[in-house]
Image (tube, helix red, strand yellow):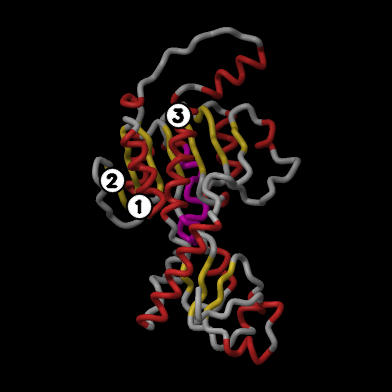
Amino acid sequence: MPGESVSLFCNLSNEQRAAVRIAIVANPHPADVAALPGLVWVQSLWAGVEQLVASLPVDGPPIVRMIDPEMSRTMAEAVLAWTYYLQRDMPAYVRQQRERVWNQIAYKKPSSITVGILGLGSLGAAAALRLNEAGFNVAGWSRSKKTLANVHTFSGNDGLIDMLHLSDIVVCLVPLTSQTRGLLNAERLHAMKPRAALINFARGPVVVTDDLLAALDSGHLSHAVLDVFDTEPLPPDSRFWHHPGVSVLPHISAPTDFDTAAMVIAGNIAQFRLTGKVPGSVDTARGY
């Protein structure tokens, strides 16, 4: 980034802090952001910006979230991998191995399985494409109506229930907002097909923990692949660790790639210097 001055916040004098126009942040302390009175915009290193939106003033500088094609590719790869895991009944084979049981389970073709995606933003759209290419039937839900090629799309509250009824595997990719917190509660989990499975790669609070455990305990849901939780790292006493119907992942579905993220940020800043326009920013009222 020739011509740019890039410094760590902790190394800046008060005079230098007053001259800062762009802040590149992960999960900053709100006081540190407030100590940069000349900010024009804030660039997040993460795709999820719920912590930034909650901690920074509504009338503060615009927040630009990370939109990286590599992150979309990585997330789509993870969605496909764990969908295959469920399609091929891998949780059952894991249990059989522990019990030393030799039993071949009937194969289910991808074309016989419907995968429903909650959230059709850049990550959801990329995941839908990969699932389509692999031969799965794909449905998708978003808060407002969207159209994607080869995807049966739904929207609104009624549309959510319809999609849950339809799906054998539900993949959660919605941002965490006031509207999506607790989105998958007892009522909506019960609306899922009997013995359906859940993959949550969004944020932990989108799914109500106790309601999910109840749905698994009752046998209504067959399995849950969880990469995100209410508290991270997942506490040692969480039931998720040893529940036979849960696969626990340590928030690894789509890590930020340092090289490509740096290129995205450098491009955003270069465009801003050229045009004076802030890149597309978060709607703080919606939370994404």
Residue drawn 44% across the image and 57% down it? 68
On the image, numbered disc 3 is attached to which residue? 84
Left or right: 131 in relation to 15:
left
Q: Which mark is nearer the camera, 1 or 3?
A: 3
The kind of residue on which mark 2 rests is Thr
Residue topped by disc 2:
153
Could you tell me which quadrant the C terminus lies in?
Answer: bottom left
**Considering only order in the chain, which callout, 3 or 1, is on the residue closer to the N terminus?**
3
Q: Amino acid at mark 1?
A: Ser
The residues colored magenta run 175-189
Disc 3 to disc 2: CB gap under 8 Å: no
Looking at the rendered structure, which numbered label has been put on residue 35?
Answer: none
With respect to residue 32, does 197 lie above or below? above
Question: Where is residue 116 shown, x and y percent of the image?
Answer: 37, 39
Q: Position of residue 180 (x, y in %)?
A: 47, 55
- Separation (CA) of disc 1 from disc 3: 24 Å
**Which of the two discs, 2 and 1, labels the residue nearer the N terminus?**
1
Disc 1, SS = strand
**Secondary-structure class at tag 3:** helix
Mark number for residue 142?
1
Q: Residue at x 60, y 90 (%)?
A: 18
Position of 144 with respect to 65 (left or right) is: left
In x, y percent, where is residue 150? 25, 40
